[in-house]
Image (cartoon, helix red, strand yellow):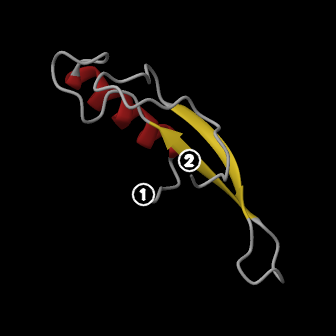
Amino acid sequence: MLAGKEIAETSGDAMGHTFENTGYTIRIPSISGTEDAKEINVWDTAGLNEDEHGTVPPEIAMENLRQLVEKLGNGLNLL
């Protein structure tokens, strides 16, 4: 949706399909057309919003998220 094309696997299934945190760089065009497009990094996170029967157990999903935030270091914005 943000990229204007499919860049990550999507599914309407109740069971998650993301097994590890995956980053994607996308270009967002200028609204006015007078500025350069912006590149942003978007992360697909594994296991969030799944219960204990999901593809990634909650405690592993939280640890993976903690490691991602630590790795990014300079901060992030949440969508």
The quarter of the displayed image where residue 13 is located:
top left
Q: Residue at x 48, y 29 (%)?
A: 21
Q: Are marks 1 and 2 in contact (CB under 8 Å)?
A: yes
Q: Secondary structure at mark 1?
A: loop
Residue 61 position (above or below residue 23): above
Residue 76 position (above or below residue 33): above
The residue identified by callout 1 is: 79
Residue 38 horizontal/vertical position (percent) = 72, 65
Q: Residue at x 58, y 33 (%)?
A: 8
Q: Amino acid at mark 2?
A: Val
Q: Residue at x 27, y 31 (%)?
A: 62
The residue identified by callout 2 is: 42
Instruction: Bin the neighbour count of mark 2 within 10 Å (Cα to Cα): few under 14, some 14-19, many 20 and up.
Output: some
Q: Amino acid at mark 1?
A: Leu
Q: Secondary structure at mark 2?
A: strand
Q: Quadrant of the C terminus?
A: bottom left
Residue 51 horizontal/vertical position (percent) = 17, 25
Instruction: Bin the neighbour count of mark 1 within 10 Å (Cα to Cα): few under 14, some 14-19, many 20 and up.
Output: few
